[in-house]
Image (cartoon, rainbow, N blue to C red):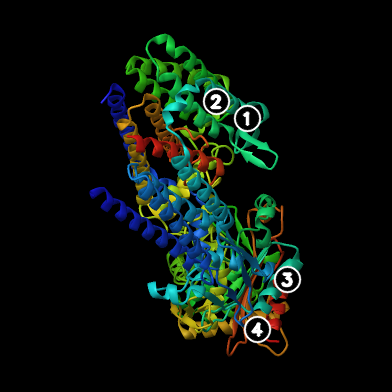
Amino acid sequence: MNDLSINIKKVLIIFLFLFLALISYFSYFVIVKGEEVANNPRNQRLAAKRNAVLRGTIYDRDGNALTKSIRVDRSTQKREYIGGLAFTHIIGYNSTKYGRTGLEETYDKELMAGSEFSFLDRFKDSHKLKNQVGNSIKLTINSQLQNLAYDQLRSTGKNGAIVAINPKNGEILALASNPSYDANNLEKDWQAITSDSNKPLINRALSGMYPPGSTFKVITTVSGLENLEGLDYKMFNDTGKLTFKGTNYTLKNYGGSATGKINLEKAFYKSVNTYFGNLAMELTNRKLKNTAEKFYFNQKIETEGFFINPSKFPEIASSDITNIAQSGIGQSEILATPMQMALVASTIANDGVMMKPKLVSEIISSEGETLKVIPDEPLGRVTSKEIADKITGYMRKVVTQGTGTAASVSGIEVCGKTGTADHARSITNEAAAHAWFIGFAPQDDPQIAIAIIVEEGGTGGTTAARIAKQIFQGAFK
Amino acid sequence: MKGKRWESRLLIATYVLCFAMFGSLYLLKEPYDTGAVVMAVIICLLFTYGYIIIRKFFPDGDKFIIMFTAVFAVIGIATLYRIDTSVAIKQVVWYTIGMTGFIALVVLLPDLKSFGKYKYFFMIMTLIFMGMATFIGQEKNGSKNWVALGPIGFQPSEFGKIFFCAYLASALKDYKKFKDLIQPAVIVMISLLFMVLQTDLGSALIFFGIAITMLYISTSKSKYVVICFLLLAVGAVISYKLFPHVRVRVNIWLNPWSDYDNKGYQLAQSLMAIATGGFLGSGIGLGYPELVPVQISDFIFSVIVEELGIIVGFGIIILYFLLFYRCMRAAIFVQDRFSQLLAVGYSTMIACQVLVIIGGVIGAIPLTGITLPIISYGGTSMLTAFFSLGIIQKISEDA
């Protein structure tokens, strides 16, 4: 054996080490860095793997499709939102770039759930395996009412929200928020959407926090009837304003008018601020807060398919009497979502029992088989049937002879409560107050409860009550 | 006779591998893809035929080399078939031509010793092929190393490699004193310079690896090796400062994510493919080779690992080493120095190519675009691999 052969053996050993080094680095890469690299958000395989299943469809309560998914290629699919702008906030969007919102997020798992396959099925039914479609969901939304609500808001030219619920089972019939945006062109419009000062991405019905104004008097009344015996028989002398010792603040009625000697019922349908300011002071902050919390203020409301921003009722020191008085008329630091106020109306309509609000009624397989029916669930009794009935009567009077006559519909006994809520900009006279209306119909057998807010829309009795009339008319057509 | 038992085991294992891979491909399509089975049968016939000829007519030669190439061809063609059927069909044609060339070399080539005297011919051919792309080359995948002559496109440096090894073997076989090294040193440096100018850094690295290995084996002097590495270091620093494309390669290697959308994209995709595959891989047809750039040639290893797993990746690396070992083994037992050096040169060429491209796609060293021998798609690459292996096969017979 010559020198060369010995050298060759040496070289062979060196290369052996080089190959071992390669394998070692390879192992190091996979074991130490592998997981981080695989989960890098830029790894399109994660999205591609998801896209193996064609996303399920979202239907309205009558079975009309609101979305459509189209297979582009093995690892991509296109989602089309065919319901129109009125549905954008409910459905949300499903974007690889901007994530998911709305039902696309809360029901993502169901919409992407492909069928389970055993090893043998792969051979027997490989066509089905390759064309998996996720489950579909059926909403409680009534498309006609939804479109009507959205169009009504749009016609005001202002921002706002409308919620309509079936008070008996918690089914949400309409959930509109204005302004909306087109989820079909998210990528193209993103810059414009996010820079819009009206913030179209926000679902105002669930996340918008507004002072509830006089619509909150429903809760003040419940608290008064529960805590102060014989309140509805007591008379109160309304001088048009309420003054407070040691401060120069005066709480006035709307327009400054005085109604004289009044009882609870009249104070309610005339929406007399002095009466409810005084009532709040009599109740004390603790008791009013307690009642508000029974209506789920300061609490997370259980729902089916969405998230409600918890409404706020403040804790006020007993010395801060002006704020306590204001809390009786829904001002102070009280903030409520339109959904919260719709649930207040709905609870009164449903004899004092609040139903769990739901947006989804059924989960359906891609073959049309019902996989799950979402049951009606009460969240609990908020107040007694007697009190609810009493307030129903008062709310009826609001529409027949009070502040909400603009909401009356011939042939249907509408009940309601208006609200004209001051907010920071309206107090400094920079803008109009928020216009509110909450209510339900018909009085004897309530089928629909609603809450309407038009931001800076003026008085509740005009702007919001007029929309309420349209909604009730549409619902009972 | 023990060797023969191993050969038949390897043969059977390769059949199993071939039918397992193409069998999966057969099931993948809708309706079943009979083309995959036809493909498997053709490939099996091809390498079995080659093996039988070698075994029957040249019983003294190495029989493992052709078997290892069969395994690589099976993995390569099956992966290409899964990515793009038409590419796989072309690759089968190249494989057939490669195998034919391999056998033709073994059958027709006279004793290799006699080629040792054509030093100047090899030298001129080396310089022509190395320089060709610098002057009439086109850019492809970021390197200006592609030449189109009429309808035929090829990578001249691939052929250059063959002559480069032959030249070095003929020049170094008569090594006596230091003066004998000057001419080969100049030729090596010119070749490296051409490669750097063509921005074909992978080939430059391979030429360096071949040259230094052959230098050491012929001179037995480790001080030369040390000097060469020092020169390489100096050269590397100079090219880093001088050529922006060298800096880009190094920066991407250090952090592929920093320039993800542009220069780092290829490596980042390769790393994500490998990492997602994990130990056992996603399975054939369940990975996403379409996301990996240049997936049929430079990055084919990442595609294979994504679908077949790290385990198969390990297997491929080990098998390349075994091929390298069998080739070097041929060199150990042959007496003639020219043949010996030639075998070493060609073996080192294949080994370096494997180390550079696999090291590159897994991020161990800066990525340079070269092919993975026999597995990657490409006519030139296939032909040079089979040509070198054919020569080594011939040498193994003389041993």
Q: Secondary structure at mark 4?
A: loop
Q: CA distance from mark 3 to mark 1?
A: 68 Å
Task: Tell me whether marks 2 and 4 sit on the same chain.
Answer: no
Q: Residue B125 location in percent, x, y?
A: 57, 26
Circle on res. A414? 4
Q: Residue at x 57, y 22 (%)?
A: B124
- Left or right, residue B263 beside residue B388: right
Q: Secondary structure at mark 2?
A: helix
Quadrant for residue B218, please give it: top left
Q: Please name which of the two marks, 1 or 4, marks the residue nearer to the observer.
A: 1
Protein chain holding label 3: A
Q: CA distance from mark 2 to mark 4?
A: 97 Å
Q: Residue at x 59, y 64 (%)?
A: A92
**How would you rate the neighbour count of disc 4 (Cα within 10 Å): few for under 14, some for 14-19, many for 20 or more?**
many
Foreground pick, A345 / B237 = B237
Do the residues at discs 3 and 4 belong to one chain? yes
- Type of the residue with mark 2: Thr
Q: Which mark is residue B126?
A: 2
Q: Which residue is mark 3?
A: A151
- Identity of the amino acid at label 1? Ala
Q: Chain of mark 4?
A: A
Tell me the amino acid under the disc marked 4: Val
Residue B352: image quadrant is: top left
Point out the frontmost of discs 3 and 2.
2
Of badges 3 and 4, the one in the foreground is 3
Instruction: Determine whether, in the image, residue B347 is placed left or right of residue A414.
Output: left
Tell me if residue A234 can be seen: no
